[in-house]
Amino acid sequence: MLAAVTMFLLGQIQAVLVPAPPVEEVPADLVLVSGHTRPVTALLFSPDGKTLASSGGDGAVLLWDPRSGVETGRLAGHTGAVRAIAFSPDGRLLASASEDRTIRVWDAGARKLLRSLAGDAGPVTHLAFGPGGARLASAGDSVRLWDIPAGKLLRVLSSREYEISALAFSPDGGQVWVASQFGDMEIQGVVKAFDARTGLLRGTRREIVRAWSGDGRWEARQEGQWTAQRIRLRQDGREAGISVAPGNTGPLAFSPGAGWVAWSAHPDDVVGIRSTRGQAPVRRVSAGAWRCELLAVSPDGAWLAVAGRDPAIRVFDTRSGQARFTLAPRGGHGVAFSPDGTHLASAGLQIWNLATRRELPGPRTEEAALGIAYSPDGRFLAAGVRSIRLWDLTAHTLVREFRGAGDVLTSPVFSPDGKLLAASSRGVVSVWDVASGRNIVQFGEPDLYNLGAVAFSPDSRLVAASARAGVIRVFDLAAGHDLREFRMGAAVAALAFSPDGRTLAAGSRAQVRFRSPAGMEVAPGQTAALAVWDLATGRGRFSVPAGDWVSAVAWSIDGRGILAAHGELNQPGSVRLFDAASGREIRTLAPRVEAQEGAFSPDRRWFTATGRSAPGAVMLWRLR
């Protein structure tokens, strides 16, 4: 779970200590997603400012309420990354263009597809509606003009000469303006004006146009280079008398009504916003390093949406300069099923109804968790980061906060009776009384690479935990002392008591990996294992190889089998069923899973894991 990496020399080969190896993306039976799972590619407010549209590399177009931060619609159908979006002037239509070489026109209110157009020979990167909303211009390998009501191509205006930087109609709709940049060191370019009726070229001027307003009346031009860059604004072809202060400027965007303009400055990513009418003061917000690759500003200038090199969309109140909310999957590590198996929670504190596949209201937090757990009655959700926070899911309120021995707490676990809560702080395990918040016991040793595995026995009397590297301690809470200590050959990653509480199963994870000409490999002697011990005698029942890591372990309902999710460093993982008495593999339940961090459903019918290859996605595999 920890991001730390330690490097040393293993003979003549560089070795790397990493908690989680890379895996390939493996199809799941069900994928639950909130927000984009790939970086955002475009942001745009509707003309009335009531909707914020975003597109992503995941092929989705999402609609948001910018006042509440709630996702209000998802336009799905593209099979490639969506590169451009555009609202019609009245806001009723939304067009999207994708790397799948199609343009789709949607009814923005009804959230349904109206037209699908064969876009171009290559990806379409820019879209613009004409003043009446009946015509649409697209730019990719060529510039094309479309009749939306008829759903047909009217004409091809031009083949692309250089990278297109802006596309717009003139205010009267009679011309289509296309800005292309040469990309040379002087950052020069050309603007071409095409007759929208005949397709003929009417004029060309040399300059660089960074952006046009939606109505085509305002344009922003970049002048200079590097830190001496300056952006000047023009209205209806005339200088507007407004000049953005010099600096290394990044993206620039107008509000749909062209009353406001926003820009960013690299590398600091401080975003300014000001009125295009008069000399209104500049408002500034800061989104953090490299988080200002895309901008959108609401018509009244009150809201600024920013996206960068991750799937997040950050919305700022420009009056206060404060971030109001983040429209994104909140990431983190861990997933948890509700006790009745009807709901699933992710470490971003996002909760889904598995029957309807809809996300439910959950606790609002900006901090993703490092492990989560439901209370046995399903009322509370515990999430660990710098502390363990206990949320009441009925009221969506924070009930209690538990502090540990270190600066981070992971892997919260409730006792079966719901009275106790345990978690690991870099190897030091704490157990608290849920009702009073009192710390009952602490044990273990600080260890940066301890994966934090913790488990309670069915009677809530015993707690097992990874106490230090390769060592499991079983603590008797009633007696107040250690009961057993077991050793494994690698870091302990998963623990589970048998249903009768007499046996303990554990899975390990190989920690040491090295780089070789063939790629990443596991160091010799570091193979992970699935092991079982009898608690009464302390004797090991069996230990069998389990690939390079074991991410989750669970006993079958009858206690006769053990389910283990494990995998190899350079291959997809699997979920397998083992005989609990002998360790013999009985069968493979799911042959190709992303099995790095996961959980089994209470009825053992599902395995779930957060998607490393698709950040923000929660994947489920049906165990057959």
Image: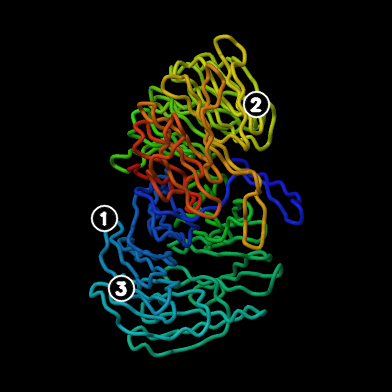
Query: Picture coordinates of residue 8 (x, y %)?
Result: 75, 49
Q: Nearer the viewer, mark 2 or mark 1?
A: 2
Cβ atoms under marks 3 and 2 closer than 8 Å: no
Badge 1: few (under 14), some or many (20 or more) residues near its Cα, within 10 Å? few
Tell me the distance, in whole angstroms, between the alpha carbons under discs 2 and 1. 53 Å
Q: Nearer the viewer, mark 3 or mark 2?
A: 2
Q: Residue at x 53, y 19 (%)?
A: 535
Location of residue 77 by image quarter: bottom left
Query: Picture coordinates of residue 385 (x, y %)?
Result: 58, 34
Q: Nearer the viewer, mark 1 or mark 3?
A: 3
Q: Is residue 35 left or right of residue 550?
A: left
Amino acid type, label 3: Leu
Q: Which residue is mark 2?
A: 428
Query: Picture coordinates of residue 84 (x, y %)?
Result: 43, 67
Classify mark 1: helix, strand or loop.
loop
Cβ atoms under marks 1 and 3 closer than 8 Å: no
Query: Picture coordinates of residue 555 (x, y %)?
Result: 42, 30
Is any atom of residue 528 visible in this view?
yes
Badge 3: few (under 14), some or many (20 or more) residues near its Cα, within 10 Å? some
Tell me the distance, in whole angstroms, between the alpha carbons under discs 1 and 3. 19 Å
**36, 596: nearer the viewer:** 596
Q: Which residue is mark 1?
A: 110
Amino acid type, label 1: Ala
As drawn, the residue found furthest toward the left would be 150
Q: Residue at x 64, y 74 (%)?
A: 223
Image disc number at residue 21 = none
